[in-house]
Amino acid sequence: MIRINLLPEQYRKKARTPIKLLLGVSAAVAVNACLVAWWGHLALGVQAEIDTEKSSLQLEMDGLTPQVNYFHSLQSEGKQYTTRETTLSSLTKSRVSWTRKLDELLDVINRGGDGQRHLIWLDDLSVAQTGDDGKGKNFGSLTASGHSGSEKFAQVANFLEDLESSAFMSDFQPPAPPEGTQTLEDKTLVPPVVWAFPLSLSLKSPEERMKAAQASDRAAKPAAQPGVQPAGAANTEKPQ
Amino acid sequence: MKERPWWLYIAGGGALLAAGLGALVYMQYGKIDAARNEITTLSTSIDSARKEIEGTAAQEREVIVLRELTETMKQILPDNDDVNNLVRTFQRFSEESKVRISGLKRKTTNARDKSDFDKVAYTLSFEADAFQVLDFLDMIESHSRFMRVPTIRMTAAQRAQIENDGFPSHRIQMDVETYVYEPKNDAKPVAIDGYDRKRDLLMGEINRRRQSLAVSTYSYRGARGRRDPWIDPRVPLLGDGQSALSVPEQMDLVQGLCDRAADVTAKWKQVKDPEINVIQSMLIRSDLEDTLATLEEDVRRIEAEHSVRYVPSERRLQSEVMDVITNIRTELVAFEAGSGPSNDTLREIEETMISHQEQGEYKLMLEAFEVIDSRLALVEADPLRKPLVDRLRELAHEARTILDFEKIQLDITGIAIVQDLPPVAVINGKSLGVGDMLNYEITVHAIRTDAIEFIFRGVIFARRF
């Protein structure tokens, strides 16, 4: 149905902005104004504060960087030298002084009292030092074919006993129990009966050798009192 | 109908604006979070940097110590040039220890190591006795350059070889390893403020670390009278003869003589050295004469007493002592050409002869005299040396007289001493009294109850019974 307002202009209801529209616009303005304020707070307040803090820290870091670089350069140089030192140290410390070992072996062989305790001589000698890099379990060996100039086989045991109680053994694992065979009797020689026996010794690991050396050093120190002759004082280690 | 789109426009515009502003706020939060993260990262970095910087002083000290150790490392393992000298070093060691090198072979090692130390290895083959091996080994292991011996293979000399040559020649094969210190990718040293001052403060630590890096060596003190364990020590049951000395004692005795012969040879070389002055030469020569005469005296005594019967030692005595003495004497004679033996030589011979005389070794007295006899005529004209020549001849005459008297057969079968009657002795079946001649050289000088005295070439001898 069509409504027609027949009232004269002056009596008609005045046209005005609808309240809903007004409310809607106001709400939109308010919300957007709040959002602008929030953004403004974040951008100009919080962000600025953080930037200031960051700049201050960056400044501090920039001040520290040369010192850190210096430290790293030193560290790098030091690492290079340390590697060399460690390599050289392991080389020198793993070395077995064969002069010492053979000299000690000669001592033991010569302390047999010309056959009273034992009369030993050797046909050969084979020495090998291996595995000091720690990769294997075999660190080397000393082997020899020995002869005992006596009809008493017990003299071989005497020799091995003397060997075990000597300083020579500090770098070796204990020897195998004595064994041997009697060679042909030669009545034109004195003594005519000879026992042949194998001598086979395994080297200890470098760490064990080091410990043994330190233990012997400690043992030698208390003995080195005035008037007391330390064991093996005649043959001493000397630094170069 | 006109109001509705307008309203919609406003609502839509407002919502769009709000959405845009919401996005801005969201993005701002993102930026703030990113900035906060950066701050956290920076703070962490600063903390770790501060911690690292705290260790700068310690690291500086460590680097200074390590830099100073580099020189020590270079001493222990010098560069490649010194490896070439290694062969010369082996030569010197072999001469000093008297080992006879027959092979020197460079051992191939793994390709260049990544570390700063390159391995260099040699296999040496040589012949020597046990103590020469130890001497050689000691020289290698005590050398300032670090060297290690990873393998030794030794085969004892045969008895026949020892008997033929007079000395043992064990066969030895030895690997000798060393390393060359060649730093790779060496970084440029960092400049450290006040380096010298800081280094001086760290000298204690530097020395301690140097000490720990130093290669320890063994103080080998030689054979010390020990027997070579690679020589069969058994002696022949029925050998060439018996000696009062044991085999090791004989070997030691000969070793001592060999050393003295070597000493005499060294002195003779010095005497011949054209670079030393006359005074020095005379002094050394005087010492040489003294040493040589004493050595000859001892050798003569050993020969006379048959002290050395062990065949290897006998051969060594002949080749390394007696032959050496003979050669030096011959050279000395040639050296003196025309001038004859010196005053010192004459005195030494005199002392030697008197020493033999005191010990009743008349044969040895004559042997000592024979060394110089043929050259005495050269110095007879010298009034200074003439009395010494006469004295030597007199001593030789006495020795010869005694030895000749000892050779004369004197068979005393009885004596008769009766009161108031001249005593009579039965010698070689003849009845002789005091003053009677046994033959044209021997006269009875006195007859006593326990001995008869004879005069032989002007010397009185008593033959006791």
Image (cartoon, coloured by chain):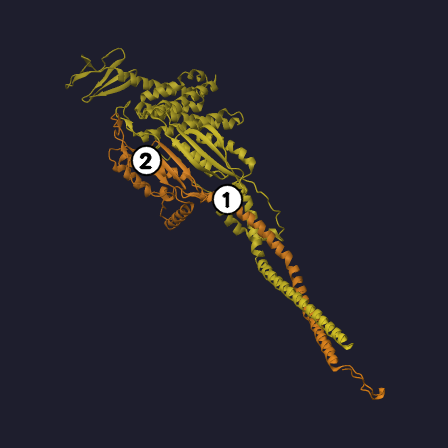
Chain colours: A orange, B yellow
Q: In this view, does B239 lie to the left or right of B205?
A: left
Structural crowding at the residue carrying mark 1, measured as other residues with C-alpha within 10 Å and reported as few (<14), some (14–19) or many (≥20): many
Q: Residue furthest left?
A: B418
Which amino acid type is shown beneath numbered disc 2? Pro
The mark nearer the N terminus, 2 or 1, is 1
Q: Which residue lies furthest to the front in this view?
A: A1
Q: Which residue is nearer to you in this view: B324 or B210?
A: B210
Which amino acid type is shown beneath numbered disc 1? Leu
* Image mark for residue A198: 2
Where residue B52 appears, as percent x and y from the top left, is 58, 58
Residue at the image point whose x is 24% and y is 26% from the top: A187
Q: Which residue is nearer to you in this view: B39 or B16?
A: B16
Q: Which residue lies furthest to the right in this view?
A: A9
* Image mark for residue B165: none
Residue B301 shows up from this direction: no
What secondary structure is marked by label 2? strand
Q: Closer to the observer: label 2 or label 1?
A: 2
What secondary structure is marked by label 1? helix
Where residue A229 appears, as percent x and y from the top left, is 36, 46
Q: Is residue B148 left or right of residue B359?
A: right
- Quadrant where the C terminus of chain B sits is top left
Q: In this view, does B460 lie above or below A227?
A: above
Q: Quadrant of residue B25?
A: bottom right
Q: In which quarter of the image is residue B360?
A: top left
For the residues labelled 2 and 1, the Cα–Cα distance comes to 36 Å
Q: Residue furthest top?
A: B440
Q: Which residue is nearer to you in this view: B440 or B146?
A: B146
Where residue A239 appears, as percent x and y from the top left, is 46, 44
Given the image, what chain letter belongs to the residue carrying mark 1? A
Residue on which the image places disc 1:
A88
Where residue A55 appears, as percent x and y from the top left, is 68, 64
Count the labels in the image: 2
